[in-house]
Amino acid sequence: MTTTPVDPGPPVDPVPQEAAQERFDATIARGDRIEPRDWMPDGYRRTLVRQIAQHAHSEIIGMQPEGNWIGRAPSLRRKAILLAKVQDEAGHGLYLYSACETLGVSRAELTELLLAGRQKYSSIFNYPTLSYADVGTIGWLVDGAAICNQVPLCRTSYGPYGRAMIRICKEESFHQRQGYELLMTMMRGTDAQRAMVQESVDRFWWPSLMMFGPPDAESPNSARSMAWGVKRNSNDELRQKFVDMTVPQAEALGVTLPDPDLRWNDERGHYDFGEPDWAEFAQVVGGSGPCNAQRLAHRRAAHEDGAWVREAATAFAERSGKGGQ
Ligand SMILES: [Fe+2]
Ligand SMILES: [Fe+2]
């Protein structure tokens, strides 16, 4: 890729490290934003690069499972909706790569790290899409889980990330709605369509719960991310919020969520639910999920196929006297 890394440059007002740290801590404590030219601890910068890159990669890799159905959409209307949704995901990836570049790492470097397997993307996209109902289920459950994760990130402490999330969240709610609407339409259709929806929900329910990451007790970086205001809620809090939000929607749809332990707990004021299969999660995150190899191979091929476009864009920019794009 030909993008030039954005050099965050020296702090505008260089101050001794201790004073800089105090200023940083005070900004976080006030709930204000840290901006690209502000001093920040190395760990904060590294955490953000890892998280924003992983998020950007997820948006781009996440285009594959749904893109799989664009050519087989059952009507022009469904095709237009799905195309718009998948294009939104490409846009989300671009906002997020741009936010990451303000931390001094280029999109080209991030892409290399992804292709080398040194940065991750969300494990959910390593599951296959086997029927058109999966387009609805992904919108409803996967984009629904993404919304639970991402709404609090609009208030994250790093300015460019938070601002990117505001726009992304608006589009995610369209994604969730279109999925729900597709499933509702199918549930009002034939027995075969209803069975197709149920089979899809059975496959995607548990992987959707895994999207919030491991339980809090096994998520060692979470506490530090929360102290820095990068994360605003723990994995388990967000998972609970997602379950509480989704169960009434499942009832309205008329689908059964595949969890025998799922029931309302009056005392807690929340739904109780079973434990996801964390061994499966570890396996998929570790690279052995059903589609890991296919997703990365497809991404690598797309990157290689696009090399001539990047070269042409660079040559054009140089000829126009802009010295790279
Ligand atoms: Fe997205
Ligand atoms: Fe989305």
Image: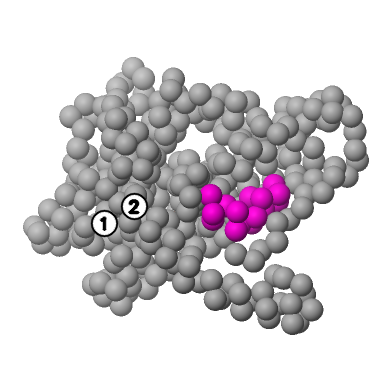
In the image, 270 versus 64, the foreground residue is 64
Q: Which residue appears at 31% of the width and 42% of the height?
A: 288
Examine the image and state in which quarter residue 47 appears: top right
Whether residue 245 is visible here, answered yes or no, is: no
Q: Is residue 56 left or right of residue 208?
A: right
User: Mark 2: which secondary structure?
Assistant: helix
Q: Which residue appears at 27% of the width and 71% of the height?
A: 73
Q: Amino acid at mark 2?
A: Ala
Q: Is residue 46 left or right of residue 220?
A: right
Residue 220, given in percent of the width and then of the height, sits at: 51, 24
Q: Which residue appears at 38% of the width and 62% of the height?
A: 298
Residue 78, given in percent of the width and then of the height, sits at: 31, 70
Q: Marks 1 and 2: which is nearer the front?
A: 2
User: Mark 1: which secondary structure?
Assistant: loop
Residue 118, given in percent of the width and then of the height, sits at: 50, 44
- What residue sits right under mark 2 in the picture? 293
Protein image colouring: one colour
Q: Which residues are magenta?
A: 98-113
Would you place residue 103 above or below residue 325 in this image?
A: above
In magenta stretch: residue 182: no
Residue 129's disc is 1
